[in-house]
Image (cartoon, rainbow, N blue to C red):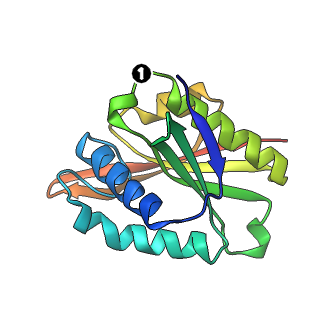
């Protein structure tokens, strides 16, 4: 058993459905991937469609992880869409299925993203995290540094604003 990665897989209907299902499951398990639990696939699907369009038509890229043929992890390399920022990339929707937590797949997909980024020639990777969940510790353990914090930028519920934490990994 283990995880195998595929960069830029064909976005079949099956993969799209699998991503929506993964996204829903991760959110409902407390993951900070653009929604607040509880969500349904129908609520996730519009945001997923926009992500699929940016992947299918470019310039964004998809990295997926499979365990025994099942989708268990993913992230999106989001292009900055600005020439002065072409030398680095933002990672979005970093997800590992809740049933696969504790197997090291989060570290594995982030290390694979770093490998791919170096191969592409990017100088750095950027990720934002939702404050209050301890995610900064995970990324710090991978070598990322906190480079900024937007206080209360994320409203997850009435009277529950969270910081958006900006993390940065230099690759050169």
Camera-nearest residue between 34 and 162 = 34
Above or below, 65 against 134 in this view is below
Query: Which residue corresponds to mark 1?
Result: 102
Left or right of 104 on screen, residue 35: left
The residue positioned farthest toward the left in the image shown: 158
Left or right of 35 on screen, residue 12: right
Camera-nearest residue between 53 and 18 = 18
Secondary structure at numbered mark 1 = loop
Q: Could you say where residue 160 lies in the image, as x and y percent from the top left?
A: 20, 51
Above or below, 25 against 54 in this view is above
Any part of residue 55 in sight: yes
Left or right of 58 on screen, residue 148: left
The residue depicted at 14 percent of the width and 58 percent of the height is 158
The residue depicted at 33 percent of the width and 34 percent of the height is 98
Give the quadrant of residue 139: top right
The residue depicted at 24 percent of the width and 53 percent of the height is 36
Q: Could you say where residue 72 lies in the image, as x and y percent from the top left?
A: 45, 40
Give the quadrant of residue 99: top left
Left or right of 128 on screen, residue 169: right
Binning the other alpha carbons within 10 Å of mark 1 as few (below 14), some (14 to 19) or many (20 upward) gives few
Q: Could you say where residue 95 lies in the image, as x and y percent from the top left?
A: 44, 44
Above or below, 64 against 40 in this view is above
């Amino acid at each position: 058993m283990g995880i195998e990665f595929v960069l830029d897989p064909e976005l079949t209907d099956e993969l799209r459905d699998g991503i929506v299902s993964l996204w829903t499951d991760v959110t409902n398990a407390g993951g900070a991937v653009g929604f607040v639990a509880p969500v349904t696939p129908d609520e996730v699907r519009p945001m997923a469609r926009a992500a699929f369009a940016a992947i299918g038509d470019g310039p964004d890229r998809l990295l997926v992880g499979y365990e025994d043929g099942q989708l268990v992890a993913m992230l999106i390399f989001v292009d900055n869409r600005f020439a002065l920022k072409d030398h680095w990339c933002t990672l979005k929707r970093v997800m590992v299925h809740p049933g696969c937590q504790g197997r090291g797949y989060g570290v594995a997909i982030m290390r694979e993203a770093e490998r791919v980024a170096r191969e592409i020639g990017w100088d750095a990777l950027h990720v934002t995290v939702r404050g209050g969940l301890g995610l900064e510790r995970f990324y710090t353990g991978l070598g990322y540094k906190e480079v900024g914090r937007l206080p209360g930028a994320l409203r997850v519920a009435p009277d529950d604003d969270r910081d958006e934490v900006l993390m940065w990994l230099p690759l050169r």
